[in-house]
Image: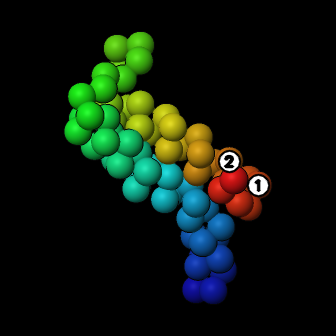
Amino acid sequence: MQVALKKLFAIMPFLFGIGFIAPLIAQVMALWGWEAPFGMERIVFGLVIGAAWGLYATIRGRWI
């Protein structure tokens, strides 16, 4: 159980990026009336940004 929790917490920034940041970006874009670039849906654009940012945070160990 301890090993499983360590692995889960190791990828937690990535999960936070796709689970919280991506929908937040999509909702803010919808609120402000912005369209996503390249004809993407807002949530897809949010997932791209959130996943990239979460992956960066997972690899580097920090968000900034």
Residue at horizontal 58 percent and vertical 60 percent from the top: 13
- Residue 61: quadrant of the picture: bottom right
Q: Nearer the viewer, residue 10 or 41?
A: 41
Q: Are marks 2 and 1 in contact (CB under 8 Å)?
A: yes
> Which residue was labeled with disc 1?
60
Q: Residue 25, relative to residue 19: is it above or below?
A: above
Please name the amino acid that badge 2 sits on: Tyr
Residue at horizontal 40 percent and vertical 56 percent from the top: 20
The residue sitting at the front extreme is 32
Q: Residue 43, relative to residue 23: is it above or below?
A: above
The label number, if any, that marks residue 32 in the structure image: none
| Residue 7 horizontal side relative to residue 46, left or right | right
Image mark count? 2
- Residue 9: quadrant of the picture: bottom right
> Which residue was labeled with disc 2?
56
Residue 25 coordinates in the image, percent (x, y): 38, 42
Image quadrant occupied by the N terminus: bottom right
The residue sitting at the bottom extreme is 2
Please name the amino acid that badge 1 sits on: Arg
Residue 64 coordinates in the image, percent (x, y): 69, 53
Residue at horizontal 24 percent and vertical 28 percent from the top: 33
